[in-house]
Amino acid sequence: MKIGIYSKDYRFVYRVALAITRRNIPWEIVDKEECPDGFDAVISDIGDGNFIHCKDPEECARKVQSYIYGKKKFERVIVGIDPGPKPGIAVVGDGNFVEEVQLSDVEEVRSYIDKVYEGYRADSFIVRIGDGDLVNRNRIINALVDDYRVELVDERNTSESINNKDIESAKVIAFTRGKRVRKKLNLIIREGYLRDIQRRSRIESHGEITISRGLAREVALGNLSLEEAIERMRRKNEEG
């Protein structure tokens, strides 16, 4: 399997080459707007010609990922999400793991899912979310449920298979059928969850700051990042 890259912009060629190399996809630069013999497809940012059109390097890499498995595109893509302060995500295309990532914040999930959807353009697209972190899972569900098929997966049925509670659990969740969620869910924030955010604030600030309960609640609701809450608490303490 071989992918060609055609563009008059050498920066585009370089960035796309890096993106598809990370996915172990063989590639070569081609000098014409068509698919030469021996190539499965040609990627280009130019609007004319017979090739795969894309602008973003990761989008390009996703559009040709299916060619590794002998397909022009995947019929079904499933995204498994292990919810938490730093969600783990695994993407499955027609039964094959095609990418995995751990995000740094719940707020990044919607943007990432949008890019996955646009890149693969599968006939069927499902997002499966573990039920282990009530607040973060509901925040993720509420960000996605209006536009995607979302399923809530009972992690108690998967825990024996999980060794790493980040990406590995997301992989298991992706292969576990869940219950369809059709509307946004209430954000129930328990005292124990707020205390845990306060505990994390002490860790992040190296023991210098414990944010207030009110700021912890703002973090739980997604109105503030933990870093922003720590900085606000630091300024308040300095002001006396």
Image (tube, rainbow, N blue to C red):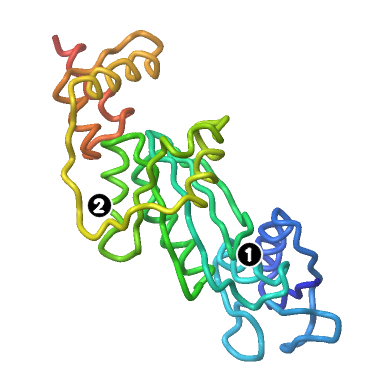
Indicate whether 186 appears above or below 240: below
**Which amino acid, mark 2?**
Asn
Q: In this rendered view, identify the residue nearer to me: 129 or 7.
A: 129
Q: In this rendered view, identify the residue nearer to me: 148 or 42.
A: 148
**Which amino acid, mark 1?**
Ala
Q: Quadrant location of residue 224?
A: top left
Q: Quadrant location of residue 96?
A: bottom right
State how far apart marks 2 and 1 are (Cα).
28 Å
- Residue that appears at 73% across and 67% down: 68
Indicate whether 125 appears above or below 161: below
Question: Residue placed farthest to the right in the image?
Answer: 38
Q: Which residue is disc 1 drawn over?
A: 61
- Do callouts 2 and 1 mark residues in contact (Cβ within 8 Å)? no
Indicate whether 153 appears above or below 189: below
In the picture, the quarter occupied by the N terminus is bottom right
Task: Locate residue 127, reporting x and y percent.
Answer: 41, 57
- Residue that appears at 51% across and 39% down: 169
- Residue that appears at 18% across and 40% down: 187
